[in-house]
Image: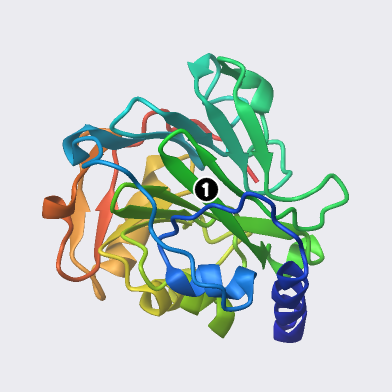
C-alpha cells in the first residue's frame, strides 16, 4: 500500500471519538496524534511494581506472553500450535491470519483486543488491562497480501515500552516512526518470506532504534541463525539460552542490540 494510504488511516484515526482514552502512553507524540494535540499526563499512582518481575515469554512464531510486575498477563498473537492453555487477562491480535488469531487457545476469560476487523480494516485500540496500557497503530502486510491490514501493538508497563510489529510488510511512515520513538523492546518478523527482507528489517530497526530487538515469526531455528548472521554486521547479537527474557531498565543496552531467544518449538508451520 502506498504511503498516502497510511497517512489516510492515521488521519481517520484522529476522527474516532475514544472515550476513556488511556492517560499513560510510552510516547507523547502518539497521544498528540490521536488527541489532536490534547496533552495527557502520565497517571500512575505510587511507585509501581518491581521491574525485575517484568518478563517476555516467547512461545514460537509471533506468540508472546507479556507479564507485568503485578501478574497481569497479555498474550500477543496466539498461534494454534504454540499457545494452547496459556492463561491471560487479555489477548492482542495483530492480523487475522490463523497463525496469529487463535484466541480460543488462551484460557482465563481474557479480553480480546483485535487490531483489525473481520473485514480486514484497522480496528483502533486504546485501553488499559490492569497495569498495562495498550495502544495500536495501523500498518499493512506485504504487497503479496493485497494490502491486508496489520496492527502494531504498543504495550506500556511502568517505564518500559514494548512494541509487537505483527506481520508488518513495509518501512515505517514518518507518522509511525514518530509514534514509536521511545520503544525499549521491539519484536519484529524476520522470516523474510511473506514480510520484510533482511535489508528492510534493518531499516525499520534504524527508524525506531530500540535498545532491544527480538526476532520473531519464524518456526525453524535456522531462520533465526540466518538473520543473526546478517544482522551482526549492523548490531551486536546476544543469543539468549532461554525463551524468556526478564526486563528492567538497568539491563537495557545503550545502543541497539539483537536478542535471539531460544526457540521453544522449532516446528514447521506458519504464513
In the rendered view, tell whether residue 78 sits above or below residue 223. Answer: above
Q: Is residue 200 visible?
A: no
Work out whether residue 174 or residue 39 is closer to the camera in this orientation and state it. Answer: 39
Kindly identify the residue that appears in the image at 62 percent across and 70 percent down.
35
Work out whether residue 80 or residue 90 is closer to the camera in this orientation and state it. Answer: 90
Q: How is the image coloured?
A: rainbow
Q: Is residue 184 visible?
A: yes
Kindly identify the residue that appears in the image at 63 percent across and 49 percent down.
20
What residue does disc 1 label?
134
Work out whether residue 45 or residue 154 is closer to the camera in this orientation and state it. Answer: 45
Please indicate whether residue 257 sits to the left or right of residue 169 in the image.
Answer: left
Work out whether residue 240 or residue 208 is closer to the camera in this orientation and state it. Answer: 208
Please indicate whether residue 137 sits to the left or right of residue 155 in the image.
Answer: right
The image quadrant that residue 210 belongs to is: bottom left
Q: Position of residue 182 (x, y in %)?
A: 35, 68
Q: Position of residue 224 (x, y in %)?
A: 37, 50
Number of numbered discs = 1
Kindly identify the residue that appears in the image at 55 percent across and 30 percent down.
90
In the rendered view, tell whether residue 201 sits above or below residue 268. Answer: below
Q: Position of residue 262 (x, y in %)?
A: 29, 37
Kindly identify the residue that appears in the image at 37 percent across and 60 percent down.
227
Q: Residue furthest left?
A: 250
Q: Position of residue 67 (x, y in %)?
A: 36, 32
Please indicate whether residue 238 sits to the left or right of residue 261 in the image.
Answer: left
In the rendered view, tell whether residue 49 sits above or below residue 16. Answer: above
SS state under label 1:
strand
Q: Residue furthest right?
A: 119
Please indicate whether residue 216 sits to the left or right of residue 126 in the image.
Answer: left
Q: If the image is split into quadrants, where does the N terminus sit?
A: bottom right
Amino acid at each position: 500500500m502506498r504511503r498516502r494510504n497510511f497517512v489516510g488511516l492515521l488521519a481517520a484515526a484522529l476522527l474516532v471519538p475514544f472515550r476513556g482514552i488511556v492517560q499513560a502512553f510510552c510516547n507523547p507524540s502518539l497521544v498528540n496524534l490521536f488527541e489532536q494535540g490534547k496533552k495527557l499526563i502520565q497517571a500512575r499512582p505510587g511507585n509501581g511494581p518491581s521491574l525485575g518481575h517484568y518478563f517476555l515469554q516467547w512461545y514460537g512464531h509471533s506468540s508472546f506472553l507479556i507479564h507485568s510486575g503485578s501478574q497481569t498477563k497479555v498474550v500477543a498473537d496466539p498461534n494454534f500450535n504454540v499457545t494452547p492453555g496459556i492463561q491471560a487477562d487479555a489477548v492482542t491480535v495483530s492480523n487475522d491470519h490463523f497463525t496469529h488469531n487463535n484466541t480460543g487457545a488462551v484460557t482465563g476469560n481474557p479480553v480480546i483486543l483485535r487490531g483489525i476487523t473481520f473485514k480486514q480494516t484497522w480496528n483502533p485500540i486504546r485501553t488499559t488491562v490492569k497495569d498495562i496500557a495498550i495502544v495500536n497503530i495501523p500498518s499493512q502486510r506485504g504487497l503479496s497480501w493485497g494490502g491486508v491490514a496489520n496492527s502494531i501493538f504498543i504495550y506500556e508497563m511502568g517505564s518500559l515500552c514494548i512494541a509487537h510489529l505483527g506481520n508488518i510488510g513495509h518501512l515505517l511512515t514518518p507518522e509511525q516512526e514518530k509514534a514509536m520513538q521511545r520503544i525499549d523492546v521491539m519484536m519484529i518478523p524476520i522470516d523474510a518470506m511473506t514480510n520484510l527482507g533482511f535489508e528492510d528489517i534493518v531499516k525499520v530497526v534504524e527508524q525506531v532504534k530500540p535498545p532491544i530487538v527480538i526476532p520473531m515469526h519464524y518456526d525453524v531455528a535456522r531462520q533465526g541463525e540466518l538473520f543473526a548472521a546478517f544482522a551482526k554486521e549492523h548490531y551486536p547479537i546476544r543469543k539468549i539460552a532461554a525463551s524468556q527474557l526478564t526486563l528492567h531498565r538497568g539491563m537495557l543496552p545503550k545502543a541497539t542490540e539483537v536478542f535471539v531467544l531460544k526457540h521453544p518449538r522449532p516446528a514447521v508451520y506458519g504464513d
